Image (cartoon, grey):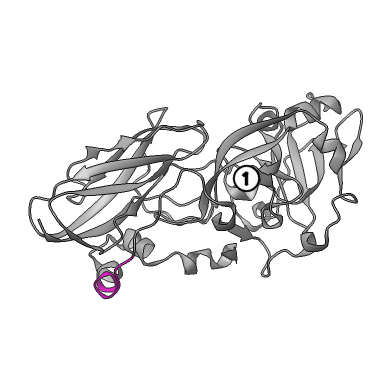
Amino acid sequence: MKVNRRTVLKLSGLGLVAGLTGGCDAVGGVLGRMFAVPPRETLYFTPNDTFYVVNYMESPFNVSRDLNVEQWRLNVTGEVKKPVTLGWRDILNRDSFDQVVTLECIDTLPGGDSLGNAQWRGISLKKLLQDVGADEDTARDVVFRAADGYDDSIPFSRAMRDDVMLAYLMNGEKLPKEHGFPLRLVVPGLYGIKNVKWIIEIEVYNGDYQGYWQRKGWTDDGTIKIFSRIDSPGHYQPLRGPEHVFRGIAFGGPHTISKVELSVDRGKSWNEAELEPTLSPYSWVIWNYQWRPPKPGKYQVAVRATDAKGQLQIAELVRPQPAGASGYHTIIADVEEV
């Protein structure tokens, strides 16, 4: 689904409403009784055609539809000794690497869908900046400008880490047009606003550059907050039988997830879930938890995660602006028979 950032909050679904209202209270409970939310399929890799798309403009970006890749150019400018203009073949002829990275929109609410996990192939931004002689004494930010007029930056120190890439493949396929063809930025651990698509210029900047969303009051840091989600069962989905498996994802942003816990009693106690192996410290993890309900009834189920640094997911419910949402995702497990 292609949406702009202002419509994300309107399209997040009933399960998200439940997470914001405590599930069986207020709106979540009323709507839940009317409409059970189906479970989500939990996959480690998100297919390209279902990977979330968010554009800053009101209408989807369409310049790339007519883009001739042989005419596309990338200009590297600013505080560099050797400014350069690169074509598509120049990018393909550089050394490349693969990595699995989860991207997340800064508008994602607890239980939201605006994140996805993919394997990316691209070139090292660090190596490119070294080759053009970026001035490490004067550079503070690296600015990325896109063909649709969007712009943002990351600190020069972050740009010079080995995990930052300029990607041209996504899940083994040519980068789809809606995901930034021919070249996009992938910075593990930073919200999507920082992962600029359709890049046509990179400027090494000697000041504190404020990008499009920063000029509108959003964060310039962009570090992803710990996120976890219950994918199945769905909110108010009728459950029958003596045992049920809860399944979902958890994402630590800059750090991998070390623990996921579920509560079935409004947060009075927490039980640790099992984590499936991952292929990258920069990706979400899939978790599973087997549960035997003691009796029929409606149970408020919440999930929380802890990252590898020992940081626990923030429980306080906070709206996305200016630095990303927080809060636990909560659903109602409707047990009809035990």
Q: How many marks?
A: 1
Residue 75 shows in the view: no
The answer to whether residue 190 is left or right of residue 76 is left
Query: Residue 101 appears at what percent x and percent y?
Result: 56, 39
The answer to whether residue 227 is left or right of residue 51 is left
Tell which residue pokes out farthest to the bottom in this image: 34
- Please name the residue that numbered disc 1 is placed on: 220
Q: Quadrant of residue 212?
A: bottom right
Counting other residues with Cα less than 10 Å from the Cα at mark 1, is it few (<14), some (14-19), or many (20 or more)? many
| Vertical side of 106 occupied by 136: above or below | above
Near-viewer residue (173 or 27)? 173
Query: Residue 115 appears at what percent x and percent y?
Result: 51, 51
Q: Residue at x 80, y 41 (%)?
A: 202
| Vertical side of 120 occupied by 27: above or below | below
Q: Residue at x 82, y 37 (%)?
A: 91
Asked if residue 32 lies in the magenta stretch, the reply is yes
Near-viewer residue (285 or 146)? 285
The answer to whether residue 13 is left or right of residue 214 is left
Query: Residue 181 appears at what percent x and percent y?
Result: 74, 51
Tell which residue pokes out farthest to the left in this image: 295
Identify the image quadrant of the C terminus: bottom left
Determine whether the residue tagged by mark 1 lies in a helix, strand or loop: loop
| Vertical side of 98 occupied by 244: above or below | below
Asked if residue 335 lies in the magenta stretch, the reply is no
Q: Main secondary structure of the magenta part?
A: helix
Query: Residue 131 appears at what percent x and percent y?
Result: 84, 25
Near-viewer residue (275 or 49)? 49
| Vertical side of 102 occupied by 214: above or below | below
Q: Which residues are magenta?
A: 30-37
